[in-house]
Image: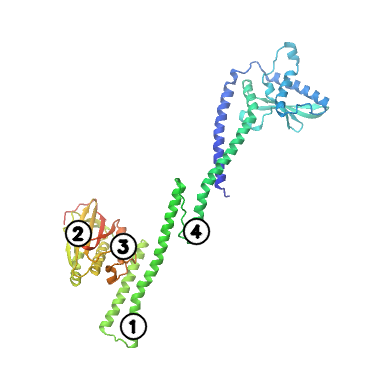
Amino acid sequence: MKFSIAYRLFVAVLLSVMAVAAVGLEVVRWQLFDSSGAFADSGKTESVDRERLHDLGDALSAQFRTHHDWSFLPPNATRRQTWLRETLLGVPTARQAAQGDRWFSSNLGDRIGLLDHDKHYLAGAVANRLVIAFASIDTIQQRLVVDGRTVGYLVMAKTQSPADELAVAFLLQQQHNLMVVVGIGVLLSALAAAVLAAHFRRPIARLVAGARRLEAGRFDTRLGIHRSDELGELADTFDHLAARLANTERSRRQWVADTSHELRTPLSVLRGQLEALQDGVRTATPENVAMMLRQVLSLGRRVDELYELARADAGQMHYDQTPNAIWPLVVDTAASFAEKFRVAGLVASVGPPPLRSLVRCDAERIRQVVTNLLENCVRYTAAGGRIDLHGKVVGDTLHVTIDDSAPGVPESAMGRLGERFFRADSPRSDALGGAGLGLALCRQILDAHGGRLEFGASPLGGLRARIVLTLEDTLLEAPP
């Protein structure tokens, strides 16, 4: 069964009001019933009250016999509440006539009521069920019989202790007011629940509608709910999530488009060469075969990079992380590029070793990162330029910095370096292109090591790439 927020709030507020009221009434009950003996008349007995009740019944029966109905009662409802007490005081008894004293309870008139033959209220004070339960009182009924026919009932509220009679009389006098207070409490509970429900349901309804729009693929959905409570925080989180989903969807579409483009280009070149050979336009010379092989190798590299990125996204790339000295690995990798630097007309220099370079990592994966960055330097740095490598300990991290000379990367593109298939609109990318997958793979590898890849402008005029890794804390090494 589904319960709305309004219903739940109404129940919660009503229970709270009832709990507070119950505590207050219990305090009143304790005060009345525990201290009422101080102002209760002494010497009252139940037998005397029953006798007075019998005398009153005889008097009322006689009047009913005369009028044949209850038409002799006061027509005013308020007057009827006091009429029975006054009638009781006017009924003489043998005990009163003999002793000239009033032996019955002084508050008896406030504890008796008159009902008709169907037990509908006629006059006096009749305790309702809530008061009976609250005060733990009993009721005594005396049947009024006229000519063998029951015409009504006299009802007397009787307490467990004679000392509590005054308290019961007070409760009977105030029971109407108590019912009014209870009714007001219920109405206030409903009003408070309605106000709170409206306050909460509007943003919740917008959240539900927004979630359904997201489910339908409308990632431009924004709620724009500005609140200072938890619902406002939830709405802000929803908007951030929608923005992330929109970016993810754009990236997915761009990924599909760029992947098809990067695979189509070498395939188109290779297809053209093969068709030329088939048509006899070209011959299978070593040069033509070598050109086709380069296209095949380029296509293979693209597929390998895509596969590596897919494995990294799925968390399937294996890393054998052990303590390794990173700086010797960087120096060794740079040395292996000596011939490529010479052919490209570049001068490379390696700075002094850092004080520490021991890092828990997969050495081959870190070598892959350094190799990729140096490959980019060779590919994009203009002939006659230079490449500098530096290592530095900053706090508990090792910074390996690779600077190259012009051309540089626009400042607006720095934040997007490392995105898949992203190529800056600059002479660096215009010259030799590239799929833009290598840097994305480097970033994935460093993220898996708890490190990061940073980019910035190089003082040499080109691009600065910085590898940041956390140094091993448990082992200390001597400077290399």
Q: Disc 4 marks which residue? A: 213
Q: CA distance from mark 3 to mark 1?
A: 38 Å
Q: Quadrant of residue 452?
A: bottom left
Q: Earlier in the sequence, mark 1 or mark 4?
A: 4
Residue type, mark 2 in image: His
Residue type, mark 3 in image: Ala
Residue drawn at 44 percent across, 57 percent down: 242
Q: Disc 3 marks which residue? A: 413
| Residue contact between numbered discs 1 and 4, judged by CB atoms under 8 Å | no
In this view, the residue in front, 135 or 443, is 443
**Label 2 Cα crowd, 10 Å radius (few <14 / some 14-19 / many 20+):** some
Question: Which one is in front in this view, the residue at disc 3 or the one at disc 2?
Answer: 3
| Residue contact between numbered discs 3 and 2, judged by CB atoms under 8 Å | no
Question: Which one is in front in this view, the residue at disc 3 or the one at disc 1?
Answer: 3
* Element marked by disc 4: helix
Q: Which mark is residue 390?
A: 2
Q: CA distance from mark 3 to mark 2?
A: 24 Å
* Element marked by disc 3: helix
Q: Earlier in the sequence, mark 3 or mark 1?
A: 1
Q: Which mark is residue 274?
A: 1
Question: Which one is in front in this view, the residue at disc 1 or the one at disc 4?
Answer: 4
- Judged left or right of residue 208, residue 287 is left
- Judged left or right of residue 38, residue 88 is right
